[in-house]
Image (cartoon, grey):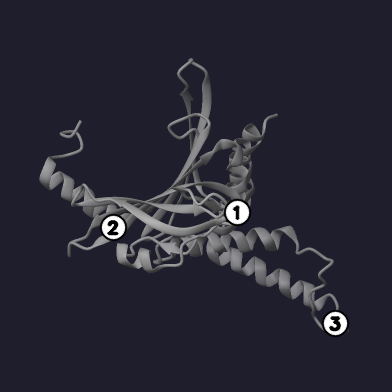
Amino acid sequence: MSGTTKATGKITAKVFRFESLAVGLPVGALVVLMVWLVIATVTSSPNQMPHRNPAVTQPAAVVEASQSAANVAQGQSREPYDMRGIQLGITLAELRAAQLPSEPGKTDLDIECNTEELQRQACYLTSKSATTGYSSRHETTLGDARGKVFFNFIRDSNKQLRLNEISFTADMDQLDGVLDPMFEKYGSPDVSEQAVENGYGATFDQYQVHWSNQVSSIELVTRCGKVHRFCIFYTHKALADFHEAYLTRTQGTAEDRL
């Protein structure tokens, strides 16, 4: 089994592991379960000070319940998602002033933007090789995967350029390196699946893995554009809606723009 097949298979396996415990349990029941397990652990050894033995792993039910509670907290958050500390909704000036994700062997990290469009701007990172001094598109580490990042800005109601979307693209053989950390950080996502074809007619499974909170979303798409590539999109909901309303007002509906 190839590394890519293992990685895509993990998507459905992980979702089943998270959801099999949480199905049918309200948040209150998960909290009661965790409290009951803690009390049972302490009272079983009345003559000992309660402490955590680093050699003993926590019961699986406690870990799963904690993860399920974390999922609820993620979904209710009103803070936009961020990528490597760069948060959706910031201005272009704030991005330029931020601490950008550097990489070993690279210097002179900078931001370049396409300024042809007045309503939106697409920006990306550049850096120089510490060995050769040549400048090129900067590859960023996300989890344990390395890929290219775009920062897409649109103008808000005050004509201020704000970060509407962050996109990350890397090869499918690196999917495990980002998929595992994302499940740990964001919890159980919504997953959909469809078949896609390459130019030679071969079919592949494509997964759309979706996390969401009150103000933003993250979507991981396998076989994205090309079958050997995956993409991750971080999107600010209100800014995306504002931009779509702007396009509808100035250029007609999405159907009109086909």
Q: Disc 1 marks which residue?
A: 181
Residue drawn at x 72%, y 69% is 37
Q: Are marks 2 and 1 in contact (CB under 8 Å)?
A: no
Residue type pointed to by label 2: Ala
- Within 10 angstroms of label 1, few (less than 14), some, or many (20 or more) residues? some
Considering only order in the chain, which callout, 3 or 2, is on the residue closer to the N terminus? 3
Q: Is residue 136 above or below residue 163?
A: above
Question: Nearer the observer, disc 1 or disc 3?
Answer: 1
Residue 131: x %, y % from top left? 57, 52
- The quadrant where residue 62 appears: bottom right
Considering only order in the chain, which callout, 1 or 2, is on the residue closer to the N terminus? 1
Residue type pointed to by label 1: Pro
In the visual, does 149 lie left or right of 246?
A: right
> How far separated are the C-alphas under marks 2 and 3?
54 Å
Q: The residue tagged with tag 1: helix, strand or loop?
A: helix
> Which label belongs to residue 52?
none
> How far separated are the C-alphas under marks 2 and 1?
27 Å
Q: Are marks 2 and 3 in contact (CB under 8 Å)?
A: no
What quarter of the picture does the N terminus occupy? top right
> Which label belongs to residue 238?
2
